[in-house]
């Protein structure tokens, strides 16, 4: 028996779970939310129902990793780091290079760092996390689990951009997608809930949190997904613009007198989306509170919903129908009005959410109305469970 830690660095969060293996019993689970956004929330569940909560400023993922490590000892979740026998790390970008999870050696770690341009908000923090564990636990294996692996099944017609072909060949300029571990997990759970083989289903999975992406899944495989070369593309997000006309990049650089292209990409990654439009907050909880008296907060929410509806419509067309749509991640699991609104706007397709069933947060549930011809499922994601399974698979 051992203890495996799964570390999941998102754009604004650090989530972790310590599992007993091979039983997969969760010994502790925690999250540090709103990293870099002020008033960060540290919450850890451990023991038999104990909970630690603290609001403090956490400026970046490095600080978050150290808070997690300190609390594992202070809360006596473990007596020493030596109890940890394996660590699994979420890594967003694996390019075409990593089609499966890997046991991390120096070459793999270098490659993960080299892929930082493919996920600038994620890979640097995730590589830093791996290096931290290599220092603290030099004899414990680290496994990297890539968001992009699940999407390597996309047909070329869906992953190519309409740009000169040689840029794909020379530079790998193509769509890679993200959140694959989450889309894969909820697709598996959806098949179980529907009591049908995954291979027979057409699913659209909505991973909507601070980062957000939508995936069309056909026969259990990723067929198309809304994120692109980096996680900047697709639907509008907490701080990311989502899809825009590429000409706006050079147009705005001229207007704003921006010389370094990275500064422009930074605006699109960190100052756009909900926070950019609302000029108020990147957090859907904040926007929901003020939307009645703040028109820009209202508009930001409406745009977020609108982009989701457009992608689902597009994917229903691409898949030639759909059996179920799945809500997951921070907003999908918790924002009751957004789920209702998205479903209402998609009623033409036979999608319908029952408002009483929908009055729930963070549990698996079929939300569909009795007459809906397409199921709507709420499925909390569990990227950490997928990560821990890959650690077991690759270290045994
Ligand atoms: N109760 C809630 N109601 C609405 N939105 C919520 C709620 N709880 C969390 N969220 C949203 O979820 C986001 C975090 O999503 P999550 O998927 O956990 O993050 P990340 O993309 O960093 O992995 C928050 O920024 C917030 O907007
Ligand atoms: C890829 C991505 O956007 O991840 P997250 O939602 O965890 O920020
Ligand atoms: Mg996430």
Image (tube, rainbow, N blue to C red):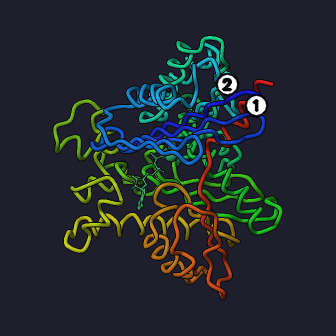
* Lateral position of residue 264 relative to residue 64, left or right: left
Circle 2 residues within 10 Å: few <14, some 14–19, many ≥20: many
Residue 159 can be seen, yes or no:
yes
Quarter of the figure with residue 61 = top left
Quadrant observed for ligand 1 in the rendered image: bottom left
| Quadrant of the image containing the N terminus | top right
Residue in the image at 34% along x and 66% along y: 301
Residue in the image at 68% along x and 58% along y: 217
Q: Secondary structure at mark 1?
A: helix
| Quadrant of the image containing the C terminus | top right
Which residue is disc 2 drawn over? Answer: 86
Q: CA distance from mark 1 to mark 2?
A: 8 Å
Which label number is shown at residue 372?
Answer: none
Q: Are marks 1 and 2 in contact (CB under 8 Å)?
A: yes
Q: Secondary structure at mark 2?
A: strand
Which label number is shown at residue 392?
Answer: 1
Circle 1 residues within 10 Å: few <14, some 14–19, many ≥20: some
Residue in the image at 19% along x and 41% along y: 254
């Amino acid at each position: 028996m051992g203890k495996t830690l799964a570390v999941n660095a998102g754009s604004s969060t650090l989530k972790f779970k310590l599992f007993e293996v091979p039983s997969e019993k969760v010994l502790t689970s925690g999250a540090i939310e709103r990293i870099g956004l002020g008033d960060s929330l540290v919450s850890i569940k451990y023991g038999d129902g104990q909970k630690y909560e603290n609001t403090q400023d956490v400026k970046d993922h490095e600080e978050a990793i150290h808070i997690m490590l300190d609390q594992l000892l202070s809360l006596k979740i473990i007596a020493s780091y030596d109890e940890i026998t394996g660590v699994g790390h979420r890594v967003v970008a694996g390019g075409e290079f990593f089609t499966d999870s890997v046991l991390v050696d120096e070459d793999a770690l270098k490659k993960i760092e080299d892929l930082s341009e493919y996920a600038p908000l994620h890979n640097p923090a995730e590589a830093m996390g791996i290096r931290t564990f290599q220092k603290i636990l030099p004899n414990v294996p680290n496994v990297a689990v890539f968001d992009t692996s699940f999407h390597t099944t996309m047909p070329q017609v869906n992953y190519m951009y309409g740009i000169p072909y040689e840029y794909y060949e020379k530079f790998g300029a193509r769509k890679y997608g993200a959140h694959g571990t989450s889309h894969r997990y909820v697709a598996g759970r959806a098949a179980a809930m529907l009591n049908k083989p995954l291979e027979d289903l057409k699913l659209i999975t909505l991973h909507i949190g601070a980062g957000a992406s939508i995936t069309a899944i056909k026969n259990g495989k990723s067929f198309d997904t809304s994120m692109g070369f980096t996680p900047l593309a697709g639907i509008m997000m907490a701080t990311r613009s989502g899809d825009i006309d590429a000409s706006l990049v050079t147009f705005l650089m001229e207007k704003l007198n921006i010389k370094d292209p990275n500064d422009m990409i930074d605006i699109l990654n960190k100052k756009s989306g909900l926070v950019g439009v609302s000029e108020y907050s990147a957090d859907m909880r904040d926007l929901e509170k003020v939307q009645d008296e703040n028109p820009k907060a209202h508009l930001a929410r409406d745009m977020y919903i609108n982009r989701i509806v457009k992608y689902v419509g597009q994917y229903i067309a691409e898949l030639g129908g759909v059996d179920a749509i799945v809500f997951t991640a921070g907003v999908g699991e918790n924002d009751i009005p957004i789920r209702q609104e998205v479903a209402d706007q998609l009623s033409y397709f036979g999608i319908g959410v029952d408002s009483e069933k929908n009055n729930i947060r963070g549990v698996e549930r079929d939300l569909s109305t009795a007459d809906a011809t397409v199921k709507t499922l709420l499925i909390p994601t569990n990227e950490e469970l997928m990560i821990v399974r890959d650690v077991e698979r690759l270290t045994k």
